[in-house]
Image: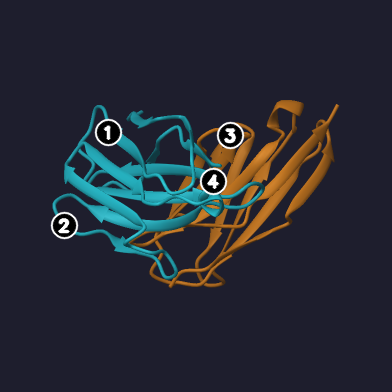
Chain colours: A cyan, B orange
């Protein structure tokens, strides 16, 4: 199956700093990428949908100025958590799909801990 | 927007028993329904999926059924094994993939 690489796998940062998470499709062109957040013992909640070359579409309640998403190429999307606070601590996971294919391929996730 | 409900939230069975997890969705435009198995701290793993033009699909011990009229779909695992213990999520896709709330399955030896 297709491979989606996500880095870093875990990050610890101080409150107020920014953290960038990268999601790469290694062997296919990801026309659409989705970013999810998962709190402990909860489901994956969609944060935003990004299409290559256009602005991301954010879900209700997700602050676009806090969670910056860039999808500048068909193989790379980034999520930047700006001015992170302890309540932003969570498991962030990306997924990618190619045009015309329903299947989503998931990255390995990033565990963010904000102190 | 799409809303996916999943039941039960926890399910405990004995090894060899069957397990059934049920989901309902709200958006009739959804046309693809995957099921994922997730272990702690790991990415969701696709275990089976079904498209809206199919009523049932089976892959060894795992089967999925879809009732488009009722907007229900279910996961059936037969002859459960301890290694089937994990959290299972259903999902529904139209323009975006929305996950159910998850079911924690525990299979006791």
Quadrant location of the C terminus of chain B in the rendered image: top right
* Position of B64 relative to A66 (above/below): above
Residue at screen point 40% across, 52% down: A83
Whether callout 4 and callout 1 share a subunit is answered: yes
User: To which residue does mark 4 refer?
Assistant: A90
Q: Position of residue B5 (x, y in %)?
A: 61, 64
Whether callout 3 and callout 4 share a subunit is answered: no
Marks 2 and 3, how far apart in space?
31 Å
Residue at screen point 20% across, 59% down: A55
Of circles 1 and 3, the one toward us is 3
Marks 2 and 4, how far apart in space?
26 Å
Q: Position of residue A13 (x, y in %)?
A: 47, 37
Relative side of B71 to A28, left or right: right
Q: Chain of mark 3?
A: B
Q: Chain of mark 2?
A: A
Callout 3: helix, strand or loop?
Answer: loop
Callout 1: helix, strand or loop?
Answer: strand
> Does the image show residue A113?
yes
* Position of B46 relative to B68 (above/below): above
Relative side of B68 to A30, left or right: right
Mark 2 vs 4: CB contact within 8 A: no
Whether callout 1 and callout 2 share a subunit is answered: yes
User: To which residue does mark 3 refer?
Assistant: B41
Q: Chain of mark 4?
A: A
Which one is nearer the viewer's eye here, B33 or A8?
A8
Marks 1 and 3, how far apart in space?
20 Å
User: To which residue does mark 2 refer?
Assistant: A54
Residue at screen point 73% across, 56% down: B8
Of circles 1 and 2, the one toward us is 2
């Amino acid at each position: 199956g297709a491979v989606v690489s996500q880095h870093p796998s875990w990050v610890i940062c101080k409150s107020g700093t920014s953290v960038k998470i990268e999601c790469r499709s290694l062997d296919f062109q990801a026309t659409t990428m989705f970013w999810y957040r998962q709190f402990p013992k909860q489901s994956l909640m969609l944060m935003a949908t990004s299409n290559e070359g256009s602005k991301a579409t954010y879900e209700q309640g997700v602050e676009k100025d806090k969670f910056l998403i860039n999808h500048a190429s068909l193989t790379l999307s980034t999520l930047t958590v700006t001015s992170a606070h302890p309540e932003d601590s969570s498991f962030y996971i990306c997924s990618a799909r190619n045009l015309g294919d329903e299947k989503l391929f998931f990255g390995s996730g990033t565990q963010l801990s904000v102190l | 927007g799409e809303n996916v409900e999943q039941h039960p939230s926890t399910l405990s069975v004995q090894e060899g028993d069957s397990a059934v997890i049920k989901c309902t969705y709200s958006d009739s435009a959804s046309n693809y329904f995957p099921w994922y198995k997730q272990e702690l701290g790991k990415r969701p793993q696709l275990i089976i999926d079904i498209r809206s033009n199919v009523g049932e699909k089976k892959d060894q011990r795992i089967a999925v059924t879809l009732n488009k009229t009722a907007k229900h779909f279910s996961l059936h695992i037969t002859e459960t094994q301890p290694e089937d213990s994990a959290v299972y999520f259903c999902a529904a896709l139209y323009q975006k993939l929305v996950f159910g709330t998850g079911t924690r399955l525990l299979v006791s030896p």
